[in-house]
Image (cartoon, rainbow, N blue to C red):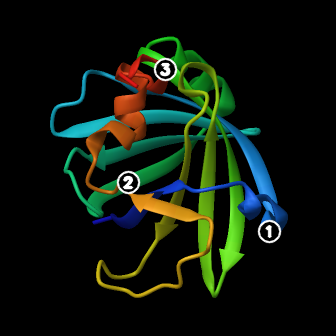
């Protein structure tokens, strides 16, 4: 069984940009309306994947991911529900851990989220100075939720 242990945080400022070692443009959307699992189609640069993740709130969830042909992904994207989630993912290494900073575009412009994948939910890690409040337990920040209820539509 695949398992993802991931914590999500808002980003406090833009000082993280000095440490970016790789960036990729991502386009993704979701098949179906959720339920017990989300099914995501993602194109990252020229690589396509199909991802199935349990619809459980928290830092640890079941996850399965498979590479698929780019042509298939393009076709599947036309079948998806909600808005596509567009973002640039920036990779940073800080104190031995890899961070992924998602800078959202389109309907989610203005949202910047940092994610760290861990081996254990209780694993300790150094918090970079640019790290803001944790949102791991706030379902609004899950990408599947952003497809249904984009950041631009949130009350301010």
Residue 27 position within the rendered picture, expressed as x and y whole percent measured from the top left: 62, 30
Residue 71 position within the rendered picture, expressed as x and y whole percent measured from the top left: 66, 24
Residue at the spot 62% in from the left edge and 73% down from the top edge:
129
Q: In the current view of this chain or complex, which residue is farthest to the left?
A: 36
Which of 70 and 107 lies nearest the eye of the viewer? Answer: 107
Q: Secondary structure at mark 3?
A: helix
Estimate the spatial distance between the alpha carbons at disc 1 and disc 3, rounded to whole Å.
28 Å
Question: Label 2: how many residues lie within 10 Å, few (<14), some (14-19) or many (20+)?
Answer: some
Q: Secondary structure at mark 1?
A: helix
Is 79 displayed left or right of 98 in the figure?
left
Estimate the spatial distance between the alpha carbons at disc 3 and disc 2, rounded to whole Å.
30 Å
Whether residue 80 can be seen here: no
Residue 75 position within the rendered picture, expressed as x and y whole percent measured from the top left: 57, 16
Q: Are marks 3 and 2 in contact (CB under 8 Å)?
A: no
First in sequence, mark 3 or 2: give its number: 2
Q: Which residue is mark 1?
A: 19
Which mark is on residue 64? Answer: 2
Residue at the spot 47% in from the left edge and 69% down from the top edge:
117
Work out whether 20 lies above or below 76: below
Which of 118 and 154 lies nearest the eye of the viewer? Answer: 154
Question: Label 1: how many residues lie within 10 Å, few (<14), some (14-19) or many (20+)?
Answer: few
Q: Secondary structure at mark 2?
A: strand
Work out whether 61 lies above or below 146: below
Residue at the spot 40% in from the left edge and 64% down from the top edge:
7
Residue 33 position within the rendered picture, expressed as x and y whole percent measured from the top left: 25, 22
Is 54 displayed left or right of 118 in the figure?
left
Estimate the spatial distance between the alpha carbons at disc 2 and disc 1, rounded to whole Å.
29 Å
Q: Which residue is mark 3?
A: 152
Is 130 displayed left or right of 117 in the figure?
right
């Amino acid at each position: 069984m695949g398992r993802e242990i991931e914590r999500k945080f808002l980003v406090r400022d833009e000082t993280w940009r000095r440490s970016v070692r790789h960036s990729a443009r991502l386009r993704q959307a979701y098949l179906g309306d959720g339920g017990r699992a989300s099914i995501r189609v993602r194109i990252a640069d020229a690589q396509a994947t199909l991802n199935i993740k349990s619809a459980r709130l928290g830092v640890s969830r079941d996850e399965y991911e498979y590479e698929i042909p780019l042509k298939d992904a393009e076709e599947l994207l036309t079948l998806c529900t909600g808005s596509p989630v567009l973002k640039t993912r920036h990779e940073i290494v800080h104190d031995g851990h890899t961070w992924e900073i998602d800078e959202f575009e389109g309907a989610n412009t203005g949202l910047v989220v940092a994610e760290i994948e861990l081996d254990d939910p209780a694993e300790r890690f150094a918090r970079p100075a640019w790290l803001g409040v944790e949102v791991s337990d706030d379902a609004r920040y899950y990408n599947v939720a952003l497809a249904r209820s984009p950041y631009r539509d949130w009350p301010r």
